[in-house]
Amino acid sequence: MKSYAMAVLVLSDKGARGERQDLSGPAVHEVLGEQYPVVYYKMIPDEKDEIVRELCYICDEIAPPLLVTSGGTGFSERDVTPEATLSVVEKLTPGIPEAMRFYGMQKTPQAMLSRAVAGIRGKTLIINLPGSVKGVKESLEAITPALSHGLGILRGDAQECGQPMAKKPAAVLAVNRSEKKGEIKVPIAKGYFAVDSGLQGDAHAGDWHRQVSLLGYESFEKIRQLGVTDLEPGVFAENLTTEGIELFTLPVGTRLQIGEVLLEVTQIGKECHLGCAIREKTGDCVMPREGIFAKVLAPGWIVPGDLIEIVS
């Protein structure tokens, strides 16, 4: 099943001041599950200008396929999430909030009072959800059956309705970077990979054989089965989170064309460093066995969604 990276933006004055625990964000993850890994999460107050800036930043800089907001969709004076969303989207997707309201009205007539909207900015689908846990769950239940197909069309991963789906090729799920060693890498909108260096701005870049690290998202599931569920792209310090390819089966010397970039595999796995948080928590870590490393032969940009082709 195709995975789509997701950002979660929670709007709450009290939550932003630390006076209320966020329960709606975890509810999003509970309903959508591992098919939609959270690559960005933030809670901010109900200030329209701040919401607009954050929506633009997420869509333009991080560019996840899906961005869900929670809160600010009601009738109060401070509820401005729909207005902020309408000011940044380029296309409206009215069927999504219509479906959420229709589904909710089967349970309570108050669902008709939701002013939630949905729309597209760039390659990101923005969906407003209510602020309550119950509202979040019911709204997502209403749209989940069609969500992945819509995102597939938006990102060019799926064919139009009525057409058979071809087998999904190997692709990049996330590009991750950290400025300091020993820190979890965070997803970025795109990365430039330089010859004899690696990902620009990354702490592990340099003129050595492990310029770029890669790990398949399928490997994350092996650690989740040990009880660790809060695993998002970059948590294993990999520069490229991939899907659809068993990286650890590739022999050293294999060349991979990813977007504009040509990589050559230089190492399979590595020794787990002391103090590895994942190993300490579960007694195991997947990166030493299934992560791979490569050097850059031809430079260029890599963005999430770029296909991975074995060229030799």
Image: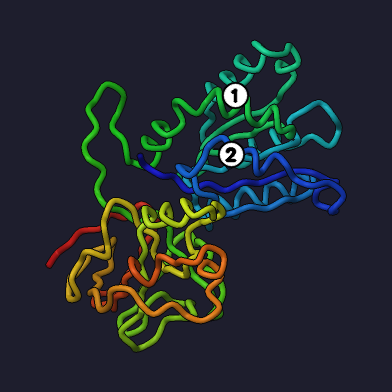
Q: How is the image coloured?
A: rainbow
Quarter of the image with the N terminus is top left
Which residue is depicted at the point 70% across and 39% down?
24
Dot 1, how many residues are within 10 Å of its Cα: few (below 14), some (14-19), or many (20+)? Answer: many
Which residue is depicted at the point 62% across and 48% down?
55
Quarter of the image with the C terminus is bottom left
For residue 160, which quarter of the picture?
A: top left
**Three-letter code for the amino acid on which mark 2 is drawn:** Glu
Disc on res. 97: 1
Which residue is depicted at the point 69% across and 27% down?
135
Q: Earlier in the sequence, mark 1 or mark 2?
A: 2
Count of labels shown? 2
* Foreground residue among 210 and 63: 210
Helix, strand or loop at label 2? It is: helix
Above or below: residue 130 compared with residue 282: above
Q: Nearer the viewer, mark 1 or mark 2?
A: 2
Above or below: residue 122 compared with residue 62: above
Q: Position of residue 244 (x, y in %)?
A: 29, 51
Q: Classify residue 104 as left or right of residue 218.
A: right
Q: Residue furthest bottom?
A: 207
Q: Residue furthest front?
A: 283
Residue identified by numbered label 2: 30
Q: Position of residue 96 (x, y in %)?
A: 54, 25
Disc on res. 26: none
Q: Residue furthest left?
A: 312
Helix, strand or loop at label 1? It is: helix
Which residue is depicted at the point 63% across and 29% down?
137
Above or below: residue 205 compared with residue 125: below
Q: Position of residue 185 (x, y in %)?
A: 52, 68
**Three-letter code for the amino acid on which mark 1 is drawn:** Pro
Q: Position of residue 253 (x, y in %)?
A: 17, 76
* Foreground residue among 206 and 293: 293
